[in-house]
Amino acid sequence: MSPGPSSEEPNHAGDSPQPSEPLFSARATTLFRVALGAAVLLVTGTGFMASAYFHSSSWDGIGFAPAQPVPFSHKLHAGELRMDCRNCHATVETSAFAGMPSTETCLSCHSQLLTSAPTLQPVMASDAHHVPLQWIRVTRLPDHVYFDHSIHVNKGVGCTSCHGEVGEMAVIAQRDPLTMRWCLDCHRNPGPRLRPSSEIFAAISPVARPHDPREELMRLDHIHLMNLTDCSTCHH
């Protein structure tokens, strides 16, 4: 006969199971949920802001107008006085780089004219100390993009087609995005942007005349549309 259960040992047969303690407190769980929601909102908001900035004019540099060593006004010189662009950008027809005016170029007019004007003192100091003027480029392209000023102006593309109405700018600023899409829009259909040779260097765009781009291209039969969209045209 087996002995029965000891009276000293508790009988758990009829007891209900005790609930286990939670791993995290209710406060910690709430804080975790709030932090997780905040992280999701932060990542989403950052993505939207990055996308908005990437598609904004600031990303493309539109409106970029750095302070130059000399406060040169294109509105005065090119617009009102109608000075030819080539007076200062001497290599625009013969080189990939249009060239920037040297101290001697400025002094070709201002060695006698307005020599005491405050705006011209950087030029006078440059001449006196034999230190070249350090102009800051406004329109910049990535290093992997090759742009040749000479080929464009010699094919009939006007200065304002890329640089904007420089004859109305007291301070030069970037007008267009200069993106690959922007370049290809012109390369696929350059006709509307072509001008006769007498208007290429006009600082203000001439009044548009209705014309058929195809007829314009036929007149300039040295422009071949098939080549304009080849990768090697801009990426050497």
Image: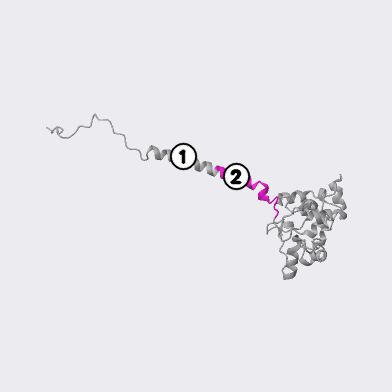
Q: Is residue 79 above or below residue 95?
A: above
**Is 30 displayed left or right of 155 in the figure?**
left
Q: Amino acid at mark 1?
A: Val
Residue 10 part of the magenta segment: no
Q: Neighbour class for label 1 at 10 Å: few (<14), some, many (≥20)? A: few
Q: Is residue 202 visible?
A: no
Q: Neighbour class for label 2 at 10 Å: few (<14), some, many (≥20)? A: few
Q: Position of residue 44 (x, y in %)?
A: 55, 42
Q: Position of residue 174 (x, y in %)?
A: 72, 52
Q: Is residue 75 visible?
A: yes
**Is 20 displayed left or right of 225 in the figure?**
left
Q: Which residues fall within the magenta stretch?
A: 44-65
Pointer 2: what residue?
Answer: 49
Pointer 1: what residue?
Answer: 34
Q: Nearer the viewer, residue 143 or 231?
A: 143
Q: Nearer the viewer, residue 220 or 207?
A: 207
